[in-house]
Amino acid sequence: MGITQLIVFAMMAGIAVIAFSRTKRLRGAAQVSFAEHVARLRHEFSQSRQPGESEVGFVTAATRNKLSKNHGFYLALTNQRLFLQDPSSNGPLRSFGRSAVSITAQPKKWIDVGNMQAAYSSGWQISINLPNGESYSGLRLYSEDAYYAEQAQNVPPFLSSLGQA
C-alpha cells in the first residue's frame, strides 16, 4: 500500500467518524425535541381533561410521499376523545368527540424504493374522518419510532381502543 492510498484511507476513516458522531448528536437532539413536544401536548390535555376521561398516550403517524413533503401527526385516543396535532403548523392540540369521528387502522406492509434500494416496513395504515369534513388517509403508524421512545408502549393501547389488538 502506497502513501497516497494510506492518506486516502485515513481521510475516509476520519470522515466516517465525523459523520457517525454528528448523526448520533442529531438523533439525540431530535429525541429531546420530541420529548419536549409531547410534554407540551400532555400539559394541554391535562388542562382540558374531562371528568372520567382515561389517560392519554400519544403516538406518531405520518404520510410518506415521493412527490411532496412527508407530513407527520401526533394522535391520541381516550375513552371520550380523539386528539390530533400537526407539529408542522405548531398549532394547538385539537380534540374531537369519539362518536363524532371515524378512525380506522388496518395492518399493512410497505415497500419504499429509492436510490436503487428497497426498504420494507410494516405497521398500520390509519384513516381519520373528522366532523368538519377534514380527513386524513394513508397515515403510517409504526410500532416503534427512533426519535420517540414512548411510541412502543403507546401503540398497543391506541390500537386496542380501535379494536385492533
Image (cartoon, rainbow, N blue to C red):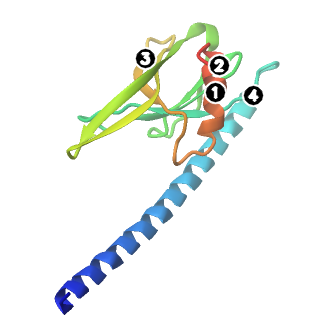
Q: Position of residue 86 (x, y in %)?
A: 49, 34
Mark 1 = which residue? Answer: 156
Q: Secondary structure at mark 3?
A: strand
| Kind of residue at disc 1 | Pro
- Residue that appears at 24% across and 87% down: 7
Mark 4 = which residue? Answer: 55
| Kind of residue at disc 4 | Glu
Q: Position of residue 105 (x, y in %)?
A: 51, 18
Mark 3 = which residue? Answer: 135
Q: Secondary structure at mark 4?
A: loop
Q: Quadrant of residue 67?
A: top left
The span from disc 2 to disc 4 (Cα, nearest Å) is: 14 Å
- Residue that appears at 49% across and 65% down: 25
| Kind of residue at disc 3 | Ser
Viewer-closest of 164 and 75: 164
Q: Report whether 72 appears left or right of 10.
A: right
Q: Quadrant of residue 117?
A: top left
Earlier-in-chain disc, 3 versus 4: 4
Q: Position of residue 70 (x, y in %)?
A: 35, 37
Earlier-in-chain disc, 1 versus 3: 3
Vertical order, 112 against 50 (above or below): below
Mark 2 = which residue? Answer: 160
Viewer-closest of 21 and 60: 21
Front position among marks 3 and 2: 2
Q: Quadrant of the N terminus?
A: bottom left
- Residue that appears at 42% across and 20% down: 136
Q: Does the image show residue 70?
A: no
